[in-house]
Image (spheres, helix red, strand yellow):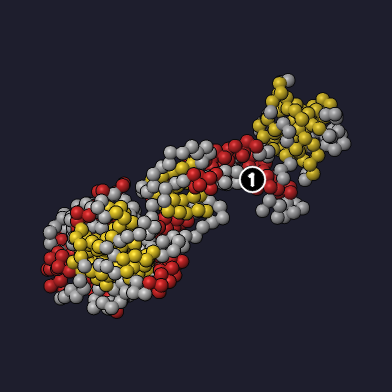
Amino acid sequence: MIRTPIIAFLGHVDAGKTTLQDFIRKTAVAKSEPGEITQSIGASIVPAHTINTLCSPLLKQLGIELKIPGLLMIDTPGHAAFVSLRKRGGTLADLAVLVVDIKEGIMPQTLEAINILKQFKTPFIIAANKTDKISGWRSSSTTLLQSIQEQQKEVQNQLDTELYNLVAKLSELGFNADRFDRVTDYTKTLAIVPCSAKTGEGVPELLVMAAGLSQRFLGEKLQYSEETAAKGTILEVKKEKGLGITLDVIIYDGVLKKGQQIAIGTTTQPIITKIKSLLVPKPLSEMRDSTANFRQVEQVVAATGVKISAPGIDEAVAGMPLIAAKDAEEAKRLVKEQVEELSIQLDDEGIVAKADTLGSLEALATLLRQNGIKVKKAAIGEITRKDISDAAASLQTEPLSAVVIGFNVPAPQLTTIGIRIMTDNVIYSLIEKLQAWRAEEKSKLEKASFKKTAKPCKVLLLKGYVFRQNNPAIAGTEVLLGTLQAGAQLMKEDNPITTVKEIQEEKENITEAKKGKQVAVAYEKITIGRQVSEGDTLYSHIPEQEYRRLKELKDYLSEDEKEALREIAAIMRKKNPLWGV
């Protein structure tokens, strides 16, 4: 038997993944999302008769007869969630729709999504969305190709320009691509469907491409037997009025029946329970909508989204596997094996990350890693005192990691001296907040560190201005480069010989003197005429470790301080060519 193909929508934030599906569902899921960015994973069933209704003229024109039961669309909060939507040996999706803003082209997250699709060898088509944004575009209720032909010549040229830019970029990434109607071999060339989630133009063509390619190329992947034990992935764990704790699940293989025994993955041991009721969303409804849009059924067939009510499922976690348990022990073993694959890579040092579900946590951890942010602890649930204590351990060694971030969890009402807590219900906003705070905090720490670091300088002992030869030696001194500081150790050539005891300008003690100043300086442990002479040039003695620190803080150095530092390095490298490298 042929099952429903699973189609995942992914792409750059704000490219229009959800609004494109909204046009098909005639819902407004995107408008209810925080920041209008999808933050949890939803699923919608598009029955075959809906595709036939929306795409009838096109299906007839292309001579396509639908054999699949429909399409199961999965909406994701970005490519990271797509990775967590997996089954044993691969991803949950049979086909992906990569949504690209036609005016923006390939953005960083689009590129990352493409790399993930290549990694998992997931076939995909491209929805070049927002054609209505092309200057002069006139919407039409005809087919997409007719609509394009009816546009003014300059509009057609602009569309082709945007598409060719996209094709060129995809070519750089190793893909042949073209507008869908110009493709002769879909196994060798990516199909690009221009479309508009706002007007609906190109949406029938997108559906036909998804259905037609699934039907034609997925072949045995869409075959299932009613004897096969049902397998699924938990999308979300919810508390529903009148039902208690329920599971939103994608069933990707087999048949699942009411009253059947199931094994469910958790963060500890698998749960074995019996299904009390199966609820499915009405056609074109979304699984995140209220239970009013659900109806009870006796069984469900892959691939579909289903809400499961069962006792003892409080410990279930989103992102975990579910298997129908003909043999309870064997099912537990299979679930346990799959759970072991669902691991989040942690670092020895880093921040603490919390999220509401496993899928969200994996998405968050993946995006943090991609942004170069280390994570030492990642867990599901609200932020606790233990999380804050774990973050506090970084205060002394790694203050920029003394942070707890929480996605889709409430901000705790706890005293947190020195610990930064950030929460948000938009993953990208949360990461941006963290990056902004770290940049500001890093600047503060660097400034504080710079104040404690010896500054580089080059000074000249002025001839005819020796006021005392020793104990301490006092001489008129000109600062040639950098900043001379009281307490600084100075060297002649590469040998440290003295320390600056005091600096006076017009008989007033000062702590430092900058380039161009002529001041009286008291030097310890030298005699002028022996270790040094009038007219000698001295440099600040910078230990190798301090030199490396100053290089890191070079943005805080003046140009003449940088020049002094370069000259100091050149002197030290006469004996050791690798000094400071």
Q: Is residue 361 left or right of residue 127?
A: right
Task: Residue type at mark 1: give it.
Answer: Arg
Residue 186 in sight from this viewpoint = no
Q: Residues within 10 Å of mark 1 (few under 14, many from 20)?
A: some
Q: Residue at x 35, y 59 (%)?
A: 312
Residue 548, percent across and down? 65, 48
Q: Which residue is mark 1?
A: 549
Relative to 351, is 219 above or below? below
Q: Residue at x 23, y 78 (%)?
A: 1
Residue 545, percent across and down? 68, 47
Relative to 267, is 423 above or below? above
Q: Residue at x 65, y 37 (%)?
A: 452
What number of labels is visible? 1
Quadrant in the rendering for residue 149: bottom left
Q: Nearer the viewer, residue 162 or 78?
A: 78
Residue 348 in sight from this viewpoint = yes
Q: Is residue 146 left or right of residue 364?
A: left
Q: Nearer the viewer, residue 493 or 285?
A: 285
Residue 293, percent across and down? 19, 56
Q: What SS does tag 1 mark? A: helix
Q: Residue at x 13, y 57 (%)?
A: 140
Relative to 468, is 75 above or below? below
Q: Is residue 142 left or right of residue 239?
A: left
Q: Nearer the viewer, residue 96 or 476?
A: 96
Q: Furthest residue to the right? A: 530
Q: Is residue 234 left or right of residue 559?
A: left
Q: Nearer the viewer, residue 372 or 349?
A: 349
Residue 534, percent across and down? 81, 33
